[in-house]
Amino acid sequence: MKLAVCIVHNRDKGHVTDELVKAGFKFTIIGSTGGFLREGNTTMLIGSEENDLPALKKLFKESCQSRDQLVNVMPFDATTPGGFIPSPVKVPVGGAVMFVIDVEQFHRF
């Protein structure tokens, strides 16, 4: 038994959850926030048998798209009135991060 901890951008949450339900995976959703852009993420906990992991990985790869977003690199509190305003920078957002952890025991009550 494996536990997949998957982090996706909130924009991808609806599509991913629909696909997980269609594929028969059971999951728990936890709201989370990314550290760099401070935007909403969704963390999903998914219990899976090892032989189902390839299908789970494929589902996330096809459902979570990476895209570019323009961000201001200067912190808001560092600017002074009339000070230098830097040009926005493109950074990739979206996609998914998946951690797969071995589960020693699993019990359903």
Image: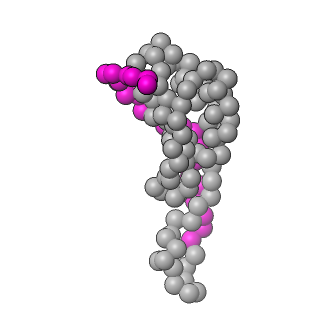
Image position, residue 6 (x, y; %) = 49, 35
Can residue 109 be seen from the camera position used here?
yes
State the residue at coordinates (58%, 30%).
60
Furthest-front residue in view? 109
Question: Considering depth in this image, is 71 or 106 the residue closer to the camera?
Answer: 106
Residue 109 or residue 51, whichever sits in front: 109
91 w.r.t. 13: above or below: below
Instruction: Please tell me whether residue 33 is drawn above or below residue 48 in the rendered image.
Output: below
Residue at x 44%, y 16% (from the top left corner): 50
The picture quadrant where one finds residue 27 is top right
Q: How is this picture coloured? A: one colour
* Residue shown at 56% from the left, 71% from the top: 86
The x, y position of residue 33, in whole percent, is: 50, 53
Quadrant where the image shows the C terminus? top left
* Residue 71 x, y percent position in the rendering: 58, 61
In this picture, which residue range is highlighted in magenta? Answer: 86-109
Task: Give the vertical position of 40 relative to 77 (above or below).
Answer: above
Q: Nearer the viewer, residue 71 or 10?
A: 10
Please state if 88 lies on the left or on the right of 50 as rendered: right
Q: Name the side, left or right, on which 56 lies relative to 100.
A: right
Determine the residue positioned at 62% across, 58% down: 70
Q: Residue furthest top?
A: 51
Residue 98 appears in view: no
Q: Is residue 83 magenta?
A: no
Q: Quadrant of the N terminus?
A: top left
Q: Nearer the viewer, residue 61 or 20?
A: 20
Q: Give residue 37's position: percent from left, percent from top.
A: 52, 57
